[in-house]
C-alpha cells in the first residue's frame, strides 16, 4: 500500500528532535538522485512505523526521524519548501521516497554518491579563532580561583630527559607515528622497511632503491619481454572503467564537464554500506601534506590498476600482496614530491616483484589511472572501496586500511572535482620511458637482440654446414657405392673366376673321383672285356683338353648314369668285337656329355699334364659273362 502525505512537512519544520537517554540511533540505508528541478531522497526503514515520523529540511540541511532510525544530511546544494515537495511510503519495501525542490532550478548537486561526506555535520561558520587570548584581569581572576595551597613536602623525582618525540611520521597525510612500535609481529608481513618510526624519509627512499636494484632479475625481465603471449592476452582485458569512460565521452561529445556523472559510476549496496560505516572526520593538511596525499593516491591507483589487469578483474589470495607490494606508499611508507617520481617508483617495482614483469603493463596501468581520474571522484572512491575490502579480508593488510585507505575513502568524498581534473591533466603530461627506470633495460634488450641474431646466424650457418656435410656425405656415399659397385663387379668377376676355377677344381676333383670310381667300378669294354688303365688317359693339347668323362653329379645321379653305362655296355657287348673302343667311348660321350674344364695347368716345361687312373686294381670288377673264360 502507498501512503501520500504533505502536511507533515509544515509540522516537521518546527519539530525539535529530542531522544530519550540511552537511545541508540540507527542510520538507515539511503540514496540520493536528482533531476533539473528536484532532489529525491529514498530512505529504507523496514521496521519503522509509518504513522510516526518527522521530516525537516531547509537550505542545505535535511533531517529524517522514524523510530529507531535517524538520518541527518548536509546537502551539496540548497533546497526550498515551496509547495511542490511531496513524499510517499511503500509498505512492501519499507521505503520513504521524498522529493524536494531545488532553490535554483537546473543546478547540479555534486557528490550525491559521497555518502560519508553527506552524513557529516554542518561545519561551524563562526569566524571565532580556535585559540583566543583572554584579558589580563579575567586571567588573574581565573588563576586565583583555581589556585591551591602548594605542598612543600612533596616527593622530589630526579629530572630525566625524555626521549624526543618521533620525527618520522607516516600514513595518510603523514599524520601517524609510533603505530609499528605496537605491531612488531605484523610489521614484516605488511611493509618492507624494518624500523619506520626511527627511519627518516630519505633513508627509506635509499633503502627502497637498493632493495629494488637487488631484486631486479634480467633473466625474468627478458623472458617476459621475448615470450609475451600471456602479456598480450592480459592487455586485451577491459575493466569496468573503460566502458564507463567510453559512455561518458560519447555523451559529452569529448568535452569534460566539471561534475561527476553518477550514471556512469554505480555503487553496489555493499559499497554503500561501506560508506555508511565510515566515521566522518576532517583532516588538517598543509600544502606539503596535501601534495603527498594526491601523489600517494596516484601510486595506490596505479597498483590497483595493475592488479585488476593481470587478474582480469578477479580477486585471489595474491591481490592484497600485489597492491601493497607495487605501491611504495603502502610498502615503504614513501612520501613522493613529484608525479614523475611516483611513475618511476611504480615502474621499477612492476619490473622487480610480481609474476608478470613487462613495461607494457606499466603503461597500461598509467592509462587506466588517467581514465579513472577523468571519470571523477566517484570512480576513484569505487576503486578505494574495493581496495579497502581486499585489505579487510587479508589478515596482515588490514593495518593499511587504518593507516591509509579508510582516510582516503573519507577524504576523496570532499575533494573538489577541479582538483582531480588538474591532477589528471598533470598525470597525462608526465612521460615515462624505460630509460627512467635506472635498470638499463634498453641495454639489456639490445644485448639480448644481438645474442638472438648471433644464435640465428650460427643456427643458419650450422644448417648450411649440415646440409653441406649431408651433401658431401651423400657424394661420398655415392662414390663409395660406385667404388663398391666396381669392386663388387671386380669381386664378381673374381668370384666368377674363383667359381670357374673352383668349378674347374671341382670338375678335376670330380674327374679324379670319377676315374677313381671307374677304377673301382666295373669297367666294361665294348668287347665285354675290362679296359686297361691306358685306355683312360687324357690328352691335353693346344692349351685345351679334350676328354671323355662322366658327369660330376650327386651320388644318386652317378648311380643312375652308371646303370645306364652298364646297360649300354651290355647292349654293346652283343655287337661285333671288332668295333673300336674309341667308338664305344665316343658313343658314351654322345649319350652322356660331360662338361670339359676350360684349361689345365701346365708345368714348367710347358707340356700338358696327364690325369691317369690309379694303377691300384679294384677287386670288385664285374665282367661280362661271355668273356670270363677268355680273360
Image (cartoon, grey):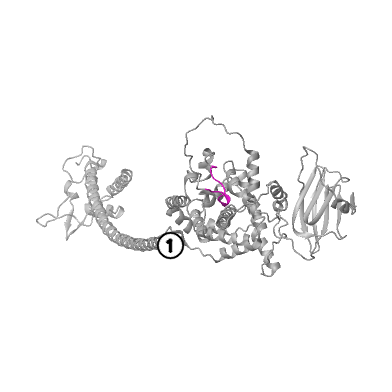
State the quadrant of the C terminus.
top left
| Residue closer to the observer: 474 or 428 | 428
Task: Give coordinates of residue 46: x percent, y percent.
Answer: 82, 44
Task: Give coordinates of residue 183: x percent, y percent.
Answer: 54, 39
Verify whether residue 171 appears in magenta.
Answer: yes
Q: How many marks?
A: 1
| Residue closer to the observer: 141 or 341 | 141
Residue 228 visible in rendering: no
- The picture quadrant where one finds residue 587 is bottom left
Tell me the chief SS of the magenta region. loop
Q: Which residues are magenta?
A: 169-179
- The answer to whether residue 331 is left or right of residue 608 is right
- The picture quadrant where one finds residue 110 is bottom right
Whether 231 is drawn above or below 612: the answer is below
Q: Which residue is mark 1?
A: 442
Residue most toward the front?
137
Residue 172 visible in rendering: yes
Amino acid at each position: 500500500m502507498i501512503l501520500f502525505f504533505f502536511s507533515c512537512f509544515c509540522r516537521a519544520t518546527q519539530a525539535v528532535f529530542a531522544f530519550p537517554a540511552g537511545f541508540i540511533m540507527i542510520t538507515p540505508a539511503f540514496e540520493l538522485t536528482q533531476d533539473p528541478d528536484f532532489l529525491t531522497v529514498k530512505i529504507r526503514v523496514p521496521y519503522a512505523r509509518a504513522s510516526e515520523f518527522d521530516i525537516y529540511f531547509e537550505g542545505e540541511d535535511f533531517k529524517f526521524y522514524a523510530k529507531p532510525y535517524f538520518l541527518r544530511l548536509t546537502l551539496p546544494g540548497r533546497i526550498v519548501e515551496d509547495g511542490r515537495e511531496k513524499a510517499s511510503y511503500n509498505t512492501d519495501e519499507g521505503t520513504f521516497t521524498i522529493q524536494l525542490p531545488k532553490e535554483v532550478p537546473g543546478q547540479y548537486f555534486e557528490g550525491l554518491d559521497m555518502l560519508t561526506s553527506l552524513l557529516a555535520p554542518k561545519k561551524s561558520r563562526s569566524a571565532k579563532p580556535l585559540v583566543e587570548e583572554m584579558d589580563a584581569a579575567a586571567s588573574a581572576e581565573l588563576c586565583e580561583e583555581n589556585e591551591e595551597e602548594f605542598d612543600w613536602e612533596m616527593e622530589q623525582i630526579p629530572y630525566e630527559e625524555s626521549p624526543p618525540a618521533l620525527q618520522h611520521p607516516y600514513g595518510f597525510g603523514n599524520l601517524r607515528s609510533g603505530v609499528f612500535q605496537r605491531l612488531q609481529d605484523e610489521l614484516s608481513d605488511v611493509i618492507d622497511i624494518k624500523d619506520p618510526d626511527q627511519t627518516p624519509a630519505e633513508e627509506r627512499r635509499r633503502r627502497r632503491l637498493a632493495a629494488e636494484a637487488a631484486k631486479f632479475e634480467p633473466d625474468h625481465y627478458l623472458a617476459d619481454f621475448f615470450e609475451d603471449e600471456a602479456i598480450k592476452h592480459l592487455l586485451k582485458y577491459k575493466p569496468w572503467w573503460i566502458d564507463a569512460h567510453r559512455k561518458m565521452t560519447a555523451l559529452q561529445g569529448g568535452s569534460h564537464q566539471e561534475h561527476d556523472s553518477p550514471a556512469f559510476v554505480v555503487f553496489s549496496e555493499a559499497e554503500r554500506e561501506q560508506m555508511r560505516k565510515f566515521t566522518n572526520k576532517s583532516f588538517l593538511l598543509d600544502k606539503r601534506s596535501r601534495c603527498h596525499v594526491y601523489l600517494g593516491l596516484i601510486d595506490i591507483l596505479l597498483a590497483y590498476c595493475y592488479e585488476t589487469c593481470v587478474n582480469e578483474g578477479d580477486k585471489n589470495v595474491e591481490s592484497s600482496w600485489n597492491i601493497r607490494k607495487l605501491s611504495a606508499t603502502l610498502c615503504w611508507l614513501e612520501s613522493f614530491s613529484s608525479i614523475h617520481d611516483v611513475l618511476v617508483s611504480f615502474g621499477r617495482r612492476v619490473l622487480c616483484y610480481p609474476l608478470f614483469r613487462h613495461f607494457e603493463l606499466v603503461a597500461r596501468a598509467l592509462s587506466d589511472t588517467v581514465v579513472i581520474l577523468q571519470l571523477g571522484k566517484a570512480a576513484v572512491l569505487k576503486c578505494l572501496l574495493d581496495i579497502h575490502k581486499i585489505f579487510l579480508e587479508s589478515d596482515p593488510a588490514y593495518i593499511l586500511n587504518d593507516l591509509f585507505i579508510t582516510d582516503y575513502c573519507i577524504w576523496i568524498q570532499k575533494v573538489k572535482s577541479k582538483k582531480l581534473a588538474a591532477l589528471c591533466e598533470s598525470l597525462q603530461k608526465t612521460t615515462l620511458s624505460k630509460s627512467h627506470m635506472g635498470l638499463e633495460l634498453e641495454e639489456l634488450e639490445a644485448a639480448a637482440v644481438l645474442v638472438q641474431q648471433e644464435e640465428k646466424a650460427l643456427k643458419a650457418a650450422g644448417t648450411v654446414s649440415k646440409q653441406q656435410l649431408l651433401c658431401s656425405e651423400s657424394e661420398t656415399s655415392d662414390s663409395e657405392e660406385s667404388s663398391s659397385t666396381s669392386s663388387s663387379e671386380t669381386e664378381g668377376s673374381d668370384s666368377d673366376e674363383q667359381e670357374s676355377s673352383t668349378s674347374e677344381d671341382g670338375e678335376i676333383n670330380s674327374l679324379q673321383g670319377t676315374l677313381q670310381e671307374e677304377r673301382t667300378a666295373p669297367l666294361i669294354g665294348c668287347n665285354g672285356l675290362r679296359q686297361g688303365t691306358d685306355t683312360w688317359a687324357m690328352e691335353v693339347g693346344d692349351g685345351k683338353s679334350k676328354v671323355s668323362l662322366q658327369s660330376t653329379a650327386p651320388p644318386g645321379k652317378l648311380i643312375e648314369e652308371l646303370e645306364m653305362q652298364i646297360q649300354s655296355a651290355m647292349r654293346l657287348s652283343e655287337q661285333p668285337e671288332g668295333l673300336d673302343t674309341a667308338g664305344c667311348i665316343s658313343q658314351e660321350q654322345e649319350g652322356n656329355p660331360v662338361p670339359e674344364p676350360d684349361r689345365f695347368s701346365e708345368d714348367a716345361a710347358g707340356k700338358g699334364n696327364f690325369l691317369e687312373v690309379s694303377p691300384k686294381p679294384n677287386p670288385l670288377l664285374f665282367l661280362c659273362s661271355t668273356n670270363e673264360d677268355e680273360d
